[in-house]
Amino acid sequence: MAVPYRFDAVQIQPDERRVLVNGTPAPIGARAFDLLLALLERRDRVVSRDELLDLVWPGLVVEDGNLAVQVSTLRKWLGPRAIATVPGRGYRFTLQPSEAVVPLRVAEPPVATWSNPLFGREADLASLAQMLAIHRLVTVVGAGGIGKTSLVLQALRARVPGQDAPTVLVELAPMSDPCLLPGAVAQALKLPSGTHADPVQGLVAALQSQQLLLVLDNAEHLLEAVATLVDALWLGAPGVRLLVTSQVALKHPQERLLRLGPLSVPVAEASVDEAMQHGAVALFVDQAHAADHRFELTPDNVATVISLCRQLDGVALAIKLAAARVAFLGLRGLHDRLGERLKVLRGGHRGAPSRQQTLEAALDWSHGLLEPAEQAVFRRLSVFVGGFTLELACAVAAESDEGGDALDEGAVVDILATLVERSLVAVDAGDPPRYRLLESARAYAWQRLSERDELATVKRRHALALTAVFERADHALWFTQDTPWLAEFTPELDNARAALDWAVEQGDPMAVGLMASLARLLFQLPLGHETRRRSDAVLPLVEREPDPALRARYWVRRSHGHWGVNQGLALDYGQRAAELFRAKGGDDIGLHEALYAMAASLRLGPEQMRETLAEMAALHRPGWPARVRADHLLAQVLCSYVQGDEEAMHAAAREGLAVSREAGSRLRVNILQWYLCTALRCLGRTDEALLVSRASIAELGPWRGWSLGYMLGEYIWSCLVKGDAVEARQSLAEFLALTRRTGWTAFGYNSYVYPQWALMDGRPEDAARLLGYADMAWRRIGTVFPDMVRTRERLVAALSPRLPEAQLRGLLTLGESLDEASASALILAPT
């Protein structure tokens, strides 16, 4: 198909053998048109009379006058200077075309040989088709490797030839010089080389009356040049529609964005059929099967595949590269090596662009588009785990950039906005929003950070920033209800863990204050066992912390972590904290917390409990937070329990519940409801105890914190009193799973329940061994409450008729040697 030409108001269309003047066909005959084409095609030289006669009238004898007549006709329509006469030599076409006109035809949809079937993009395809039908300028924006080009190619394949405008695709990734952009577009349009002084305006002139869809793929590195071209085409070529793919928007006032997110990943527990409904898994399976036809998604490997796709953030390129390695590494081997993803995810399709051959190359492409200061902020953000706030980003990424110039908070905010626009940083929903690097981008940025001398500096800034956040959290919890407090500070848990690990590794005493504050969050979550483990790691640094207030807070929070596990240590740590608070002075709430920790250790006798309560009462000030008042009432509950005064225990528990609900403390509500049930059971009001415990468990909903174990134990106890074996067994199974998961919290405290259950289950020998375990557990706890003494007496009385005295003593001794795991296995052993 020949290319049409434009000469200002004149347009020559060779295929249609037509000349348009101001859009109107000119009455030019066949011979004149043949002569015009002969001159036009040889416009770079003079064409002799004989050559023209042979071209226009081949094989015929024609008078010279015929040639002159046709030249005169052409000059009439094209202008007197369009064809020059060169005396003695011939004629020459002298007009220079403005630009070629795009052929009015539907181009074949561009198809890349390396593109794959599209998975999980049905909604995106529909949105893109709708946007293209309505808007002239659409930009598909997304991170590198997310699948922008694949989506566009699929959308172009769906266009209807003959009905939609012609389509021209221009691949910009290989182009490094923005000055070459107009020429690359002209070449894709099959335009002849123009002579227009401004190549962009030359394109506009050539396209001003044409209808087509111009696709500019991978525009992020030529953003300014592409934006200039788009502006010019928008104003001067109204029939041209534009579809752009880029990691960042053009910011044209008429631009409409389709932000392409990651492929969907199913929940970890999804079945094979459910998992295949998600684009990430479907793509992985397709590519893994292509690499190894034996690969299938099965119930045995679906959880591993889901985990892989989640760790790869649903990014199409990363998933393709990972799937290609399954045949070599195996699925489990691939999963285990994702920590080295930049080394592992290599070997893309041979026909793919070089930037898509490896994950690192794709990230190199995106990183190379950043200014030095942007690169500095990008790599510093890699220190965050699980996202970050704007405040934390500024605290960690500020300071000096590549050239030593200051990067203040304002500069960091601007750069962070740029990284978001370039799809290198994702913004999670929320107000205020949280930001995060996708895992692959974070791995790349971390590698860049690790190569530089600033790694230690950035990690220290990160630790200091998290210490400040949790210092604020520590203070705020006294005055804030659980729900908003947890919503604000739980997202920083992984960051705090990383900061604490670094501080411990470095031997930095800042770990003491961070641990003291972090423990409050861990304690609100079902992570009491983690509190103990991390407190142990910090212990060697405690005496190096110069601030006695931080040391005191460390000891009191360490005491909390040992409740229900080792009550003797809980008392010891509470006493250390109290001594430090008393010596320093000025922190009455801190001292009150330490005294409460001592009371809650259950290691204080009746007289010591009364003294502790009196000291707590003397500290009270008007206007103290409700949580502090609730702790005082909890201590009163325990004092009444130790003294065997169940009526006073019941009254204090009810009052404490009201105060705890006022404080919005789910943990205190749960604990006080548990003690309320204990009081009701001791008072013989078992039906009421069952109602309260059921309501409490239902109120907690899906939250399965450590304190739930105490409530479940009380519920099981009441079920045994009522003789409900079915409910008791089911609740015991849940309790055992929970206590094992939380480091055996509440296991020893509820130990007198286990022999009662074994007796009901018809297993007196197991009951005797479990009674021996319970005796040992309560010796370790310390204080034995009066109702526990009565319970043990009833158990011995029930076992004595069933087992000979010597066997009973032997089984009790055997039980004392059981650990938590073996006792747990014995509780629900089959009959």
Image (tube, grey):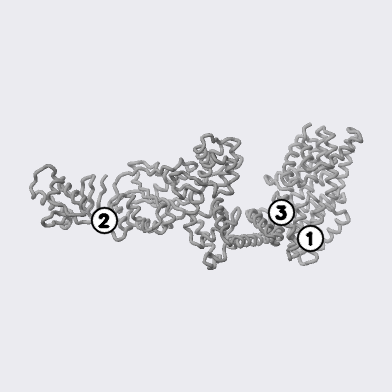
**Residue 46 drawn above or below residue 348:** below
Locate the C terminus and report the quarter of the image it occupies.
top right
Q: CA distance from mark 1 to mark 2?
A: 87 Å
Q: Nearer the viewer, residue 205 or 664?
A: 205
Residue 476 seen by the camera: no
Residue 241 seen by the camera: yes
Of tags 3 and 2, which is closer to the observer?
Answer: 3
Of tags 1 and 3, which is closer to the observer?
Answer: 3
Name the residue beneath numbered marker 1: 577
Q: Are marks 1 and 2 in contact (CB under 8 Å)?
A: no
Locate the N terminus and report the quarter of the image it occupies.
top left
Coordinates of residue 802 in the picture (x, y in percent): 88, 32
Q: Are marks 1 and 3 in contact (CB under 8 Å)?
A: no
- Left or right relative to 540: residue 323: left
User: At numbered mark 3, what does the secondary structure look like: helix, strand or loop?
Assistant: helix
Characterize the local packing of mark 3: few (<14), some (14-19) or many (20 or more) Cα atoms within 10 angstroms: some
Question: Which mark, by number, is residue 534?
Answer: 3
> Would you identify the image quadrant in which residue 499 lies?
bottom right
> Would you identify the image quadrant in which residue 465 lies?
bottom right
- Left or right relative to 83: residue 237: right
Q: Nearer the viewer, residue 508 or 482?
A: 508
Q: Amino acid at mark 2?
A: Ser
Q: Earlier in the sequence, mark 1 or mark 3?
A: 3
Q: Amino acid at mark 3?
A: Arg
Q: CA distance from mark 3 to mark 2?
A: 75 Å
Q: Nearer the viewer, residue 69 or 701?
A: 69
- Left or right relative to 308: residue 642: right
Coordinates of residue 346 in the picture (x, y in percent): 51, 46
Name the residue beneath numbered marker 2: 98
